[in-house]
Amino acid sequence: MTPAARISAAIDVLDRWFSGAPVEQVLTNWGRMNRYAGSGDRRAIRDLVYDALRRRRSYGWLGGADSGRGLMLGALRAAGTDPAPLFTGRDHAPPPLDNETGLPLDDAPEAVRLDCPDWLFEEFARSGFDGRAVLNCFQRRAPVFLRVNLAKITRDDAIGILAGQGISARLHPLAATVLEVTDGARSVAASDAYRDGLIELQDAASQAVVDALGVTPGLRALDFCAGGGGKALALAAQGASVTAHDANPGRMRDIAPRAARAGVRIDVLKALPKGLWPLVVVDAPCSGTGTWSRDPETKWRLTPERMDQICDLQAEIINQAAKNVAAGGRLAWITCSLLPRENAEIVSDFIKRNNGFQLEANRSLTPLDGGDGFSVSILKRNDSLM
């Protein structure tokens, strides 16, 4: 496909996304319906689409419209490229320009320049970190990180094995298990290192919050909202005896094969947990505002009403999970959100209702630290009965 044809395809995908379809579903369907497109074409179109979603407001401003065509025009103008030679209407190129000039980005409101919904811009402004710098990070693609299974291999040896398979990686300071992939990221999932359980794909900040839990070998831990098992696997790799649970058991279907590949055991519990654990980890459903580089679609699907629903659900989850914390045990509240109302405020409100718990430690990470945005609050249970 020519560059112009790829832009046409990206416009088509984005317009379908604007109609309400999930972006991954649209990309998959487009690939199935256009089998002439090679893998390189599909990757290029995907990159165009995700870059446009990361910078929807600024590209739309430059392109003159909040549409697939407007975003692609804006993307070219942001890169200093004249779109006219690509918008010709010939050989699958987009139709020619028709007075679509857009506006100078310097004249745009700050929320537009930083690609943030207006209603969330103020939330970031009061977040306690440099919200503008973080929003600027979200305009770029997120790095690819690996978690090295230290029970099987060292980070240095993992770097060597990956290099032999055409994947370049380097040490990253955010956690003792992290490698950052600098080249060959698309080959990771097909590599021998991945197949043999030497590495897992996991964000650096996600690994860092697990490190903050102070896991010791043999510690019994309940992963209350396990999902695909990323945190459960990281806990097990540090020697914890892990039980995984999720309100939707179907989300845990990959845990068993991933655990087998890593050489660890994770007990999967489909029913609501009844026992007590010294450590209960809650990687809570959240707005995902810390992952906008990786998942920019969520930025535009989130609404104030949906935000309220998420916080109500979080209050229910922390109450339920606390029932499984043994006396003297700890409850770890983790989100991939940067908003106080999902972190400090949820924890503070919970402690006010449950004076048997006290805040022991907390840590917040933003993309300025090198990974996604994550928060972890560790609460200690001091009472014997609830």
Image: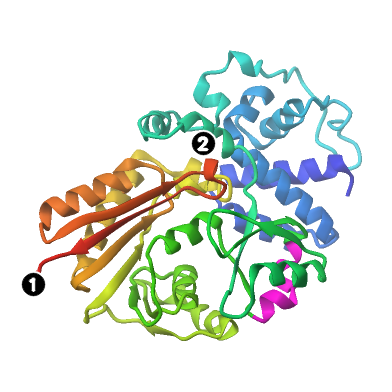
Of residues 88 and 150, the one drawn nearer to the viewer in this rendering: 150
Q: CA distance from mark 2 to mark 1?
A: 42 Å
Secondary structure category for the residue under label 2: helix
Looking at marks 2 and 1 on the same chain, the residue that comes earlier in the sequence is marked by 2
Q: Quadrant of the C terminus?
A: bottom left
In this rendering, the answer to whether 160 lies above or below 45 is below
In this rendering, the answer to whether 136 lies above or below 307 is above
Of residues 380 and 288, the one drawn nearer to the viewer in this rendering: 380
Kind of residue indicated by mark 1: Leu
**What residue is pinned by disc 2?**
134
> How many tags in the picture?
2
**What residue is pinned by disc 1?**
385
Name the side, left or right, on which 385 lies relative to 150: left
Disc number at residue 88?
Answer: none
Q: Label 1: few (<14), some or many (≥20) within 10 Å?
A: few
| Predominant secondary structure, magenta span | helix
Kind of residue indicated by mark 2: Val
